C-alpha cells in the first residue's frame, strides 16, 4: 500500500496464497519504482516451506515483474536494495539442501542475490555462513565501493571465525559483489545488561 502525505491511500496491491506470506523489505529505484522482497509459503509441496519472492511496481502501482525462487526448505528474502549501478541486490537466509537456493555451509546460511532490474531474472547468487545458523539483517553499499553485510550468527567455521555464545553480531565488509571471500570481518559479542 502506498499512502500520500495527507494519509490517504494512493494505491494498493496484494499477492500471496493460502499460507503465511510476508514482506520483509522494500526499496525505491531512481525512477520511483518500488521493489519488495519477503517470503511466500508453498503449500502444495511436501513439506510445506517458504520461497523468496521479489516484485517490482511502478510509482502508480502496476506490477512490472515478479520472481519467486527457493529450494526444498525455508528460504526468506530479508533485505533489498538498489546499488549505484541501478541493479537489484537482496540478502536472505536459506536452509534448503536442493533446488534454486542451497545451504552449503550449515543449518541456515546467508545468500546474496543480484537480479536484472528490468526483468527480475537472477544474475548471480553467492553464499556466506558457518556450521550453524546465520541470518542477515541489512546489506549496504559503501561509498568507496563494495558492500557491508550485518547479520546474526551462531556459527564458528567457514566464513565465520569465532563464536562468543548463542547469537553473535557479525559484520562483513566486501569489496566485490556478490561476495566470494570476505577480506574484513569484525565480530563481537554484545553483553547482556543486568537489571
Image: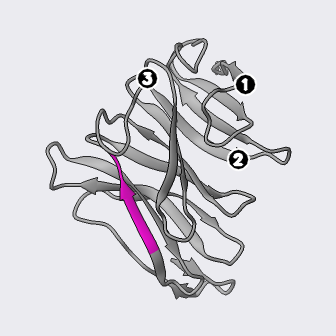
Which residue is drawn at the image coordinates 67% and 22% (left, top)? 190
Q: Residues within 10 Å of mark 1 (few under 14, many from 20)?
A: few
Label 2's element? strand
Which residue is under mark 1?
183
Tag 2 or tag 3, which sits nearer the N-term? 3
Image location of residue 19, percent across then percent down: 24, 58
Marks 1 and 3, Cα distance to the nearest angstrom?
A: 18 Å
Which residue is drawn at the image coordinates 51% and 71% (left, top)? 56
Marks 3 and 2, Cα distance to the nearest angstrom?
A: 23 Å
Image location of residue 89, percent across then percent down: 59, 53
- Against 48, is 87 above or below? below
Q: How many marks?
A: 3
Tag 3 or tag 1, which sits nearer the N-term? 3
User: Relative to the observer, which residue lies in front, 193 or 85?
Assistant: 85
Q: Which mark is residue 105?
A: 3
Magenta segment: does it hold 133?
no
Quadrant assignment, res 20: bottom left
Image location of residue 94, percent across then percent down: 40, 38
- Magenta span: predominant SS is strand
Which residue is under mark 2?
140
Give the extent of the magenta segment: 65-70
Image location of residue 82, percent across then percent down: 66, 60
Select label 3 or label 2 by which is in front: 3
Which residue is drawn at the image coordinates 47% and 55% (left, top)? 122
Identify the image quadrant of the C terminus. top right
Q: Residues within 10 Å of mark 3 (few under 14, many from 20)?
A: many
Quadrant assignment, res 22: bottom left
Amino acid at each position: 500500500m502506498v499512502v500520500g502525505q495527507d494519509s490517504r491511500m494512493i494505491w494498493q496491491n496484494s499477492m500471496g496464497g493460502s499460507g503465511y506470506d510476508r514482506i520483509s523489505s522494500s526499496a525505491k529505484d531512481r525512477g520511483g519504482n518500488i521493489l519488495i522482497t519477503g517470503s511466500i509459503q508453498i503449500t502444495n509441496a511436501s513439506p510445506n516451506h517458504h520461497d523468496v519472492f521479489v516484485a517490482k511496481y511502478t510509482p502508480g502501482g502496476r506490477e512490472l515483474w515478479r520472481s519467486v525462487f527457493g529450494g526444498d526448505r525455508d528460504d526468506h528474502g530479508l533485505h533489498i536494495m538498489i546499488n549505484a549501478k541501478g541493479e537489484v541486490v537482496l540478502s536472505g537466509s536459506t536452509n534448503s539442501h536442493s533446488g534454486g537456493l542451497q545451504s552449503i555451509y550449515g543449518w541456515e546460511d546467508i545468500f546474496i542475490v543480484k537480479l536484472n532490474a528490468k526483468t527480475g531474472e537472477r544474475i548471480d547468487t553467492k553464499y556466506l555462513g558457518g556450521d550453524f545458523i546465520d541470518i542477515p539483517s541489512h546489506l549496504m553499499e559503501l561509498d568507496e565501493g563494495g558492500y557491508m553485510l550485518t547479520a546474526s550468527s551462531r556459527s564458528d567455521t567457514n566464513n565465520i571465525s569465532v563464536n562468543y555464545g548463542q547469537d553473535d553480531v557479525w559484520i562483513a565488509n566486501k569489496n566485490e559483489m556478490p561476495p566470494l571471500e570476505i577480506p574484513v570481518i569484525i565480530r563481537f559479542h554484545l553483553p547482556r545488561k543486568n537489571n
